[in-house]
Image (cartoon, rainbow, N blue to C red):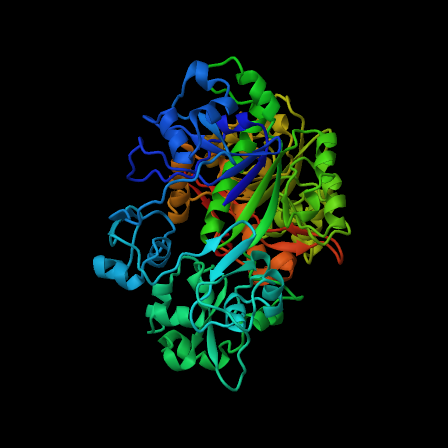
Amino acid sequence: MRLNKYVLFTIFAFAVMHSQQLVAQDTLKVNKTNNKVFISGKPFYIHIVKRGQTLYRIAKAYHVTVEDIEKENFNIKAEGLSVGQPVKIPIGKEKTPSPEKTDMPRIHVVDSGETAYSIARNYHISLKNLYSLNPGAKDAIYRGQKLFLPEKPDTTTTKVLQDADFIYHIIKKGETLYSIARAYGVKARKIKRENNNIDPNDLQPGQVIKIQKGEIKYTDQKPTAKKEKYYYHNVKPGETLYSIAIKYETTDTKIIEHNPQLTRRELLSGEYIKLPKNEITLPDTLQSQSAGMVTQTSDSLLQDTCQCPVDGGKDRMQVALMLPLYSFTNDTINRNLTYQKIYKPSRIFLDFYEGVLLAVDDMSKKGMNIDLHVFDTENDTLKVKSITESSLFPYFDLIIGPVYSQNLPIVAERAKLFDIPLVSPLSTESDFLKNYVKGFQVSPTENILYRKTIATTKEFKADNYIIIKKGNRPEDAFVNAFKDEFFRGKTVNEIEHLGYAEITYYAGDEELNLDPFVDSLHNFVILPSSDKAFVSDVVARLNTLSENHDITLFGHPRMINYENIDIQFFHNLNTHIFNLNYIDYESEAVLDFVYKHRKFFEKEPGKYAFYGYDISYYFMHAYQLFGGRFYCCFDQFYPALLQMNFNFEQQNQGNGFINEKMLLLNFQRNYLLRPVTESKR
């Protein structure tokens, strides 16, 4: 994973990201990070100082001199090092290290998301050898488990040599140019073009050829229908090679044999892997479906099920992240302080940024190499415009941000010119989606919210329906649409006997009109306003009424963030609110994320860290599986996320997509907060 961050160095004092493994390691040992950072066009590693580390040890680990580090960190010589301090390590000053021993650590501590296969691959040992030392690992491994490792890597395992652009393949006996091309899913002529110094008809064992990463596709060549037939298994979140092998009564070795791409990367959730029909046994639950199982290649499968041709199997992408981090302001207010103080408007975006970093890390474990370019937009349209005019801009595969609505059209205009997908992560303004099919808006518009509210409130059974609207600015469009739907299909006699009322209430009125409320009946109250002062006043008064009246409140999503409303009021009123997310802290995935966030950043994740993770992971994973036209495959792409679900719908032909998926949350009277399923409404 390489992170190119176009922000000032001081941002790392607030978003402390490091790639050193913290499990069961001596803090005196310096673990070299591989994360590259560009500051004013100059490459650096950013090392986070741990307790007990010295400048000499750090310099030695990175193969630079103490003077090289002091030159780039002017305060170190005068003030020394402190725990948690980010240190710039210049790249390009490294001395050639002496050859290292091949002895390996005897114990590996399992981290979240690791599998036996990925651990064996990382240490260049076979699964057979790993299982022989750890018999229980055949059944399952778990976070924190200690696995014994052989002293040396398998001599038959060759480490893949690669850099940012190429994989360097060492030719083995019997290999031909065409067998190598098939193994990597690359055209033979493209390999010849990159290696014009090698005779393709006279390859010698030990020769090295380079293969451009951008050309590699992780799908096997098409088999002829007459020669071989496969079942295709769609990989589910959490599945491993071992669990799939057990399910089909085969071995992980056999699966890898027919899916050679898995020798170079891990399974991808949502991908299809080939299972030879004559070497597996179908589970009982699939026996009856065997006639309808997939017997074609994953390439043709994607084209059949997606609405337009796609280009999947990506293993590299350039991602631009545009956030108002206010790095200059943060640098200024901290210049003379001995403690870190963060400029308030940047806090939630730093949380968002941390979530994106963790998503990038998880994608790297799925075989995706991501160059993350982070731009500090502040809230400055001129700064945003300059970013879109940079020489890097045309090469981005995905843009996340900006977050302010006034900046979106500026970026969208240029993104459309270069056919780059653009994701609006937080804004509810959708103007930038017009005539831009690769525009994606995560937050639903007010119109979508009102439409879902009307459809949902119809399902609630009550004796009395009451709408409370603001006097000087009634939500007329919503109220009129609600009444049209509410009274639709009812006779005049039925309407006369319906319990329905509208209350026009002015904030500051001494009393709320109690006439429509009935003591002995269930009162269903709809409060469509998002005005903070108005909503806060009404909720407080409704809370008082709830002592003698049975009230269920249906409110606007923004009211959940109003800090001046006592959360107990929501529970007393059995409040229902649509929201974009719900964090279940009993979920294993959420607990794993919290654990990883603590390990990387040494603090609890903020709400927007979950946002940053889910949004970036969703789109980066979609690009990996389907390429730049991933929107053609939304109807078959449902990755497991932490706290959100997405349902992107195109807003008219030729326009972009808006997420219409929202969760209905219920503040229950037993003080629990739970999402409401449709069957329970």
- Foreground residue, 444 or 408? 408
Image side of residue 166 versus residue 446, left or right: left
Residue 462: tell me if it is visible.
no
Instruction: Residue at 33% x, 71% y: name it.
Output: 251
- Foreground residue, 666 or 248? 248
Residue 593 rendering spot, x and y as whole percentages: 42, 43
Q: Quadrant of residue 491?
A: bottom right
Q: On screen, 582 above or below 567?
A: below
- Foreground residue, 512 or 51? 51
Residue found at the far bottom of this picture: 226
Residue 71 rendering spot, x and y as whole percentages: 51, 22
Image side of residue 185 versus residue 82, left or right: right
Residue 306 rendering spot, x and y as whole percentages: 62, 66
Residue 619 rendering spot, x and y as whole percentages: 58, 51
Instruction: Residue at 54% x, 82% y: name it.
Output: 224
Residue 429: tell me if it is visible.
yes
